[in-house]
């Protein structure tokens, strides 16, 4: 991928897109095309087509999606399915029609079945039903993966599909209505410590296991695979190592210095029992992440603390 290429980062204001923007700019990629949601509605087919005709991107990093945690997915499944289908269908089709040279699709480990064997190999896709609490999002992401893959087969569309594990990092949301588990736990424990709480109640049993990767490691994977021959249908991107939510909570509690007790509300859902990727294909192609979970958690705690202090200063 030439450093003078026109590179459209769809979703540049989100966690993945902003990580790509930071990395690409630091590596000298000078022609980044960035459009806010208010400037380009990706659910509008005509607007997307007009945008592609005008800007003619050579490469598309597709990191745009409607995302959220368990409760958001439970409350708004129709929105998650409809909007994500519309966004990806419009962008993939416009990329094909306008002869984009390279399309990099960022999927999700939620595409795998709820009861998938662990760790999850690429061939386990569509061997069972999705996790019910985020079924709508999973169906949309499966459709996006398959659309890019089928276009590659039918039209010679140059597509790379990357399926990352759970992500965290700069620009993650700490809004408990929309946040993912790691950022939510950072907020909950940090607030409990500063407010002098003696107990904190968390959803589920804590037994569910998740794999976490820093979003900067995903951005590096995107740049790496953009500059390598890629003949795979899709590949997993992650550590191949998971941790229970209970262990994660205890780790964050210790790092923020919370001294109270943790109560688990077992009436709330755990979500998928385990999500750990099998990443031998990724490693065989020469990429491995390098930001440890401990270092990443310390960064997230500092980011949340800075945001909270800034919010207090403006009140």
Image (cartoon, grey):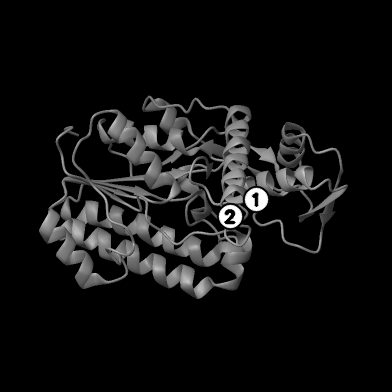
Q: Mark 1, residues whose alpha carbon is within 10 Å: few (<14), some, or many (≥20)?
A: some
On screen, residue 205 versus residue 224, left or right, reads right
Which residue is disc 1 drawn over? 184
Per the image, the residue denoted by label 2 is 179
What's the residue at 58%, 55% (across, down)?
179
Q: Residues within 10 Å of mark 2 (few under 14, many from 20)?
A: many
Residue 247 % position (x, y): 75, 38
The reply to whether dot 2 and dot 1 touch (C-beta < 8 Å) is yes
44 or 208: nearer the eye?
Answer: 44
> Where in the figure is residue 296, as x and y percent of width and height?
57, 32
Can you say whether 89 is above or below 273 in the image? below
Point out residue 170 in the picture as x, y percentages from the top left corner. Answer: 49, 41
Q: Secondary structure at mark 1?
A: helix
Q: Position of residue 26 (x, y in %)?
A: 31, 29
Query: Would you identify the image quadrant in which residue 182 lies?
Result: top right
Can residue 132 be seen? no
The answer, for residue 192, to whether it is visible in the render is yes
For the residues marked 2 and 1, what is the alpha-carbon distance in whole angstroms?
6 Å
In percent of the image, x 18 and y 32: which residue is there?
A: 3
Q: Quadrant of the C terminus?
A: bottom right
Q: Quadrant of residue 295?
A: top right
């Amino acid at each position: 991928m030439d450093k003078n290429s026109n590179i459209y980062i769809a979703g540049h204001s989100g966690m993945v897109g902003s990580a790509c923007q930071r990395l690409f700019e630091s590596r000298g990629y000078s022609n980044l095309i960035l459009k806010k949601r208010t400037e380009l509605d990706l659910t509008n087919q005509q607007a997307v087509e007009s945008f592609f005709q005008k800007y003619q991107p050579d490469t598309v990093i597709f990191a745009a999606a409607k995302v959220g945690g368990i409760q958001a997915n439970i409350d708004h499944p129709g929105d998650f399915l409809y909007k994500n289908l519309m966004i990806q269908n419009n962008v993939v089709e416009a990329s094909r029609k306008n002869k984009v040279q390279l399309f990099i699709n960022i999927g999700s480990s939620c595409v795998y079945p709820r009861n998938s064997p662990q760790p999850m190999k690429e061939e386990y896709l569509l061997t069972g039903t999705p996790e019910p609490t985020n079924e709508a999002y999973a169906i949309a992401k499966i459709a996006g993966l398959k659309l890019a893959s089928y276009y590659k087969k039918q039209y010679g569309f140059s597509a790379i599909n990357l399926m990352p594990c759970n992500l965290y990092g700069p620009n993650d949301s700490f809004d408990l209505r929309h946040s993912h588990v790691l950022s939510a736990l950072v907020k909950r424990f940090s607030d409990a410590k500063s407010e002098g709480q003696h107990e904190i109640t968390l959803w589920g049993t804590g037994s569910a296991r998740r794999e976490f990767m820093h979003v900067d490691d995903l951005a590096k994977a995107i740049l790496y695979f953009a500059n390598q021959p890629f003949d795979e249908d899709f590949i997993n991107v992650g550590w191949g190592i998971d941790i229970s939510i209970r262990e994660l909570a205890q780790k964050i509690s210790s790092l923020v210095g919370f001294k109270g007790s943790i109560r688990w509300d077992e009436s709330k859902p755990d979500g998928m029992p385990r999500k750990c990727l099998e990443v031998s294909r990724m490693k065989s192609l020469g990429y491995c992440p390098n930001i440890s979970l401990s270092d990443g958690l310390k960064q997230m705690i500092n980011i949340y603390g800075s945001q909270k202090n800034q919010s207090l200063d403006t009140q």
